[in-house]
Image (cartoon, rainbow, N blue to C red):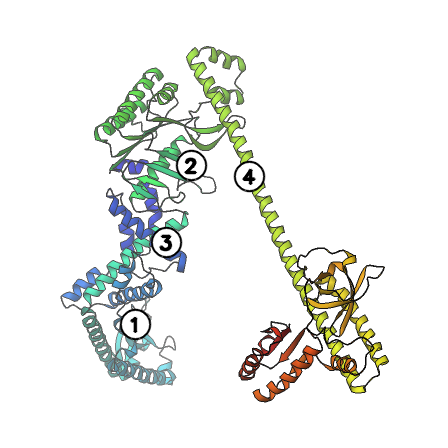
Amino acid sequence: MNYKSLTTLEYDKIIDRLVSFAASDKAKERLKKLVPMTDIHDINAALSETSDALSRVYAKGAVSFGGVHDIGASVKRLEIGSSLNTVELLHISSLLTAAARVKNYYEDTTDSLTGYFHALEPLTPLNTEIKRCIVSEDEISDDASANLRSIRRQKVLAAERIHTELNKMLNSSSVRNCLQDFVITSRSGRYCLPVKAEYKSQVPGMVHDQSATGSTLFIEPAAVVKLNNDIRELELKEQAEIEAILAELSAKASEFTDELLTDFQVLTTLDFIFAKAQMSKQYKCSCPVMNTNNYINIKKGRHPLIDPHKVVPIDIYLGKNFNLLIITGPNTGGKTVSLKTVGLLTLMAQSGLHIPALDHSELAVFDNVFADIGDEQSIEQSLSTFSSHMTNTVSILKEADAHSLILFDEIGAGTDPTEGAALAISILNDLHKRGITTMATTHYSEIKVYALTTDGVENACCEFDVESLRPTYRLLIGIPGKSNAFAISKKLGLPDYIIKDASARMDADDVQFEDLLSDLEHSRITIEKERAEINAYKQEIQQLKDELKTKSDRLDERRDKILRKANEEAAAILKDAKEYADQTIKTMNKHGMTVKELEKQRSAIRDKMNKRQEKLSVQAAKPKAHKAHDISEFKVGTHVRVLSMNLIGTVTAPPSPKGEITVQMGSLSTKTKINNLEILVGYKDPEEAKKAPKGAGGSGKIKMSKAASISHEINLLGLTVDEAVAKLDKYLDDAYISRIPQVRIVHGKGTGALRNGVTAYLRGVPYIKSFRLGEIGEGDTGVTIVDFK
């Protein structure tokens, strides 16, 4: 890889930002040495690791790799049997703590990083022992060993004895007058008293120090010399015990040197990988699709070093239909940024880094990326801008091949425009013939014409708004751009006569070409506006469709709710009417009413049923379609079906002036409109032959009495199967004779024995048309509904 181009494309700045995401020194060193790779398999493996790390970060958050110290030197000392100091052992403990933290945090996911997590060995017993023994770099715990605890206890007791002895001396009148200060001090680890120099002879002991003025001597009284010596001996024993403890911990650690090195290497590698993932998250990057076909297709790519709130994403592609892209446009329009974006994103991807672009962006793997960007004038080498650029170009032409990416900024600039344009075209044409992927920026119209007239070469431009004198930074491929020098100069206040004079000095071909570019630009803007309007219309239509669907769904929901409520109300009305009728029949049977009173009660029931029927007819479900009948077809004795109640009855009176028909249904009579009736052709009433004339004697009265006393429901709860069948047999005979079309048998759920017995019996009754278990609202499986023939 051409390392000069890495600096030119600011790859080093990307690395500096990447390093900031790592925690361990070793990982930072690896990141600083990260360079683009050229093997697509290695690149894809690195990208896959970055993607998997990013997925884990999004799923569970980031984990800290802090505490990962380089223990390489310590492990080597362990291998030769040396003892480690407290700092080295604490570094091992910190490493093992990080290993446990990382392993527990991420181990449950399976991807390309799984092997790393499985390789971690937290060595919990060793880590626990180190933490138990070592409190800090300067302190060993009293619990490290029983001997150390005993030695430190003896030190404390000895110090207390010394303080007791010295306090006696401080409180002694003979010594007190000799002291400079009434305090106990320490010199060279031995307890002393500050004695005035003139009273030195009155305080026997060893002089350890004196003040700067010589007026105070620090004397260790003879009475505590022995005690101070004891403390000194205990300190030596303490240090020896600490060394023994450290040696023991080191011996334990030496048993796991391979595991320790593996943990360090794995944690460093994971820190390295997760740093790339953290940068991807920070810059909202995605994983590019790599290829070896020199094909580039960047979707909404952003230069990562530009403020994300200001950068304008660009779409750029080359390498499929053309391998040479000429970018034109005004200064500060974004041409150089476009070049650097392509080069830098290529280098990032080949380093295993995600790129700041949309998903499924594609980049090629190049063996070399060459960039000649910026003013590299060299005073020391007496090189002009043109000479400097040409020196780079000569070097690039020598080294580049079909697997290279070349980026030229203002190719051919810095010399005579005519010669510079001709030279630039020749260089670009040579690269094009050699099949080298190239991007170049220019202001030369000759190069624009070359791109328009040569296969495999394409123009592009950075859009510029002449009205506001501001670049939009949009890159438009397929359209040559204008320099807009005249327009910009006019806006900035250059007199018109100078601009006209300059225009007159341009060649006719140049003027015609610039006019053509202006027309193309105008047409492009018009097309884009129309396209934007079409997209706006599409969005509006889609919004209206969504609103219409929402309203339709809401109406369907309201309709279902209304129908459900209507059905519930209809069921309640029928239940109320049935209960009222049953109660009235029970009352009549209880009091033994006369025929006249009975007729009066029947009329009352009929009126109430008619009122219920009116409510029901409003909310009933839509009746089954049937042939419309003429009112003249309804004769007395005609069998009809009342559609709203789904009951069969007989017309008992001619139609009323209002067009209402009186229908008798068993013991119930009602008046209804003809559109609620269906004539049953060929229907034969099984009891019609037995029906006695109205006003007849005994048999008619018996039937009347039975019809009035038979309920539409029988309750068999609490009976045995035999008892229930006997009671049911008589009830069904009475109900059938009374011409009740439908009855309800209550047998309960229970164990199901009574229900099964009832079902077996009903199968053998000849005058039963059908029977079924009840539905929700009718009693469910606790009742059986029976329809008679």
Q: Quadrant of the C terminus?
A: bottom right
Residues under numbered marks 3 and 4 in contact, where contact means CB atoms less than 8 Å apart: no
Nearer mark to the viewer, of 3 and 1: 3
Tell me the kind of residue under disc 3: Leu
Q: CA distance from mark 2 to mark 1?
A: 55 Å
Q: For the view shown, which residue lies furthest in the left direction?
A: 80
Which residue does the numbered mark 4 point to in the structure image? 538
Q: Quadrant of residue 676?
A: bottom right
Q: Quadrant of residue 557?
A: bottom right
**Which is nearer the N-term, disc 3 or disc 1?**
3
Callout 3: SS: helix
500 or 54: which is nearer to us? 54
Local crowd at mark 2 within 10 Å, few (<14), some, or many (≥20)?
Answer: many
Which residue does the numbered mark 2 point to in the structure image? 314
Q: CA distance from mark 3 to mark 4?
A: 37 Å
Which residue does the numbered mark 1 point to in the structure image? 131
Tell me the kind of residue under disc 2: Ile
**Which is nearer the N-term, disc 3 or disc 4?**
3
Q: Is 755 placed left or right of 627 in the picture?
A: left
Point out residue 159 in the picture as x, y percentages from the top left corner.
Answer: 31, 81
**Which is nearer the N-term, disc 2 or disc 1?**
1
Kindly identify the residue that appears in the image at 31 percent across and 27 percent down.
Answer: 377
Local crowd at mark 3 within 10 Å, few (<14), some, or many (≥20)?
Answer: many
Q: Quadrant of residue 292?
A: top left
